[in-house]
Image (cartoon, coloured by chain):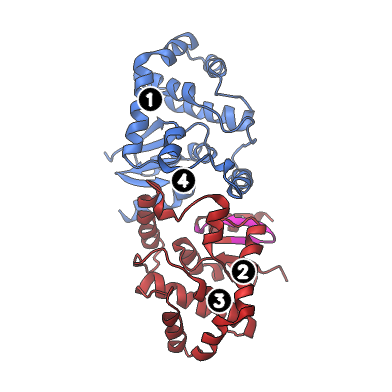
Chain colours: A blue, B red
Amino acid sequence: MAEPIDFYFDFSSPYAYFASTGIEALAAESGRELRWRPILLGPMFKATGSAPLTEVPLKGSYARHDFERTARLFDIPYRQPDPFPIGTVSAARSVLFLQKQGSDKVAPWARRLFSAYFAEQRNISDTNVVLALAGEMGLDSAAMAAGIARDDIKALLKTEVEGALARGVFGTPFIFVDGEPFWGFDRFDHIRKWLAMA
Amino acid sequence: MAEPIDFYFDFSSPYAYFASTGIEALAAESGRELRWRPILLGPMFKATGSAPLTEVPLKGSYARHDFERTARLFDIPYRQPDPFPIGTVSAARSVLFLQKQGSDKVAPWARRLFSAYFAEQRNISDTNVVLALAGEMGLDSAAMAAGIARDDIKALLKTEVEGALARGVFGTPFIFVDGEPFWGFDRFDHIRKWLAMA
């Protein structure tokens, strides 16, 4: 069995959202498992001396245009969220908590968080919104509330972010296939070509 | 006849080089002319507060890896140039000079400069190298030497850079199709989808 594909993402990244809609199919094509690895972009921006895309002069307005156009061209539901970007600590921790529980709902939960924010204007920086979404999906929101606040889950997110930085992650989506790094939704076809040549 | 496609590039940009190998085919697919528009990235970096890709922490080493991998995956001849990046004022001016002359050699000349730098380790920041390449191709290198030094050609390059900035160009390759902006070699498939939907 080939190594799982590592999918690093921040829930506030539009290109990570786009990637989330297709990456399971991509993994399945090569018979691989997918590891959903939520991280936070803040520390990456600090490490590279950069800023959220939409705050960069010139690049920012292009990026907003590209978000909406990419969604349209790839037929992905999208409504530019407001506020944007947002903090995603609770959302990230909720995924790590489910993983630690051994839940089989990790993937649908991560996809749900992404689409709530990027297609339904639900502000997942608010822990209450995260918990409400969990309840709607039939997850135990009381257990999740406790999980998000647990010290070991907080520590795990820090470790994940540090581990990602140590592997050279500086933005999301960031994808590793057998240790080979790919940055961006626009690297999906590169991944396919790379797998075909491997 | 549809509008020509505007192709903005800096001769020191690897992704612009990759784009240069396929953009004529892309334009031809939609029955369009292609306008080769050399610019300089320096003023764009200033406007966006950014730096050459390879000088950004973390991003830099990924970028170098991505240059070589992209070349391999798309079957484009590539040898990481050294020195890199370089100043491309003379190369850019030489293209503008040929355009102003009404030469029919603009496209092969631009492609020649790109491949000399990115596949053959010839340092086109050196005006003498540019002129030698022109001679090898059967162009009048004495006329080109005079052209590169002409005040109107110098002014034209400045105007082109300012015009690009005014249109929102912040990196290269930057491509306009009917005013629609696309940044990056990795937007070729977006351009194709966009043209198909237009």
Residue matched to label 3:
B93
Q: Position of residue A128 (x, y in %)?
A: 56, 15
What amino acid is at disc 1?
Answer: Leu
Residue matched to label 1:
A157
The answer for which chain carries disc 1 is A
Q: Position of residue B172 (x, y in %)?
A: 53, 60
The answer for which chain carries disc 3 is B
| Circle 1 SS class | helix
Q: Which mark is residue B158?
A: 2
What amino acid is at disc 3?
Answer: Arg
Badge 1: how crowded within 10 Å, few (<14), some, or many (20+)?
many
Discs 4/1, front:
1
Magenta segment range?
A: B175-185
Badge 3: how crowded within 10 Å, few (<14), some, or many (20+)?
many
Query: Which mark is first along the chain, 1 or 4?
Result: 1
The answer for which chain carries disc 4 is A
Q: Which mark is residue A184?
A: 4
User: In the displayed structure, does residue A97 sit left or right of residue B162?
Assistant: left
